[in-house]
Image (tube, grey):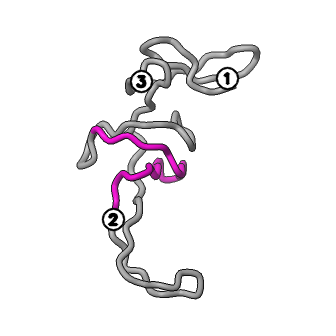
Amino acid sequence: MKVKKGDLVQVISGKDKGKRGKILRVIPRENKVIVENVNMVKRHQRPTPRLREGGIVEREAPIYACKVMVVCPSCDKPTRVGYKFVDDRKVRYCKKCGEIIDQV
């Protein structure tokens, strides 16, 4: 997958098109990601010892990874991601401006 936990991404299709958020969790087996404040769903939560109050709770649901694009930190635009080797390390870079996305 070309996205990692902690990446800033922008949704490119669907009901949340245009929204930006940080990736909270990556599910590679299903090719899905959970993005902060994107694809919010309401869950009916029963009270448990850990969670005192029950009720309707809003939380993020998984979204397909192909529906998000990584936002380049230098040009601040959604971009495709490429790979190249720098000092014997494989790093991701922005296809628009050529800057390295991964922090060293």
Question: Which is nearer the N-term, disc 3 or disc 1?
Answer: 3
Task: Judge left or right: residue 61 versus residue 83.
Answer: left
| Image: 67 above or below 80 | below
- Taking depth in this image into account, of 81 and 35 the one nearest to the observer is 35
State which quarter of the image contains the C terminus.
Answer: top right
What residue would you read off at disc 1?
90
What residue would you read off at disc 3?
76
Residue 41 marker: 2
| Image: 1 above or below 57 | above
| Image: 39 above or below 72 | below
**CB of mark 1 within 8 Å of CB of mark 2?**
no
Question: Which is nearer the N-term, disc 1 or disc 2?
Answer: 2
- Marks 1 and 2 sit apart, C-alpha to C-alpha, by 37 Å
Looking at the picture, how far across and down is residue 77, in whole percent? 38, 24
Structural crowding at the residue carrying mark 3, measured as other residues with C-alpha within 10 Å and reported as few (<14), some (14–19) or many (≥20)? few
Q: Would you identify the image quadrant in which residue 46 lies?
A: bottom left
- Taking depth in this image into account, of 68 and 51 the one nearest to the observer is 51
Task: Judge left or right: residue 103 versus residue 12.
Answer: right
- Marks 3 and 2 sit apart, C-alpha to C-alpha, by 28 Å
Q: Give the range drawn in magenta.
A: 18-41
Looking at the picture, how far across and down is residue 61, in whole percent? 40, 59
Structural crowding at the residue carrying mark 2, measured as other residues with C-alpha within 10 Å and reported as few (<14), some (14–19) or many (≥20)? few
Q: Would you identify the image quadrant in which residue 54 lies?
A: bottom left
Foreground: disc 1 or disc 2: 2
Foreground: disc 3 or disc 1: 3
Query: Is 40 one of the magenta-colored residues?
Result: yes
Looking at the picture, how far across and down is residue 66, in whole percent? 39, 39
- Mark 2 residue element: strand
Instruction: Give the amino acid type for the residue marked by disc 2 in the picture.
Output: Val
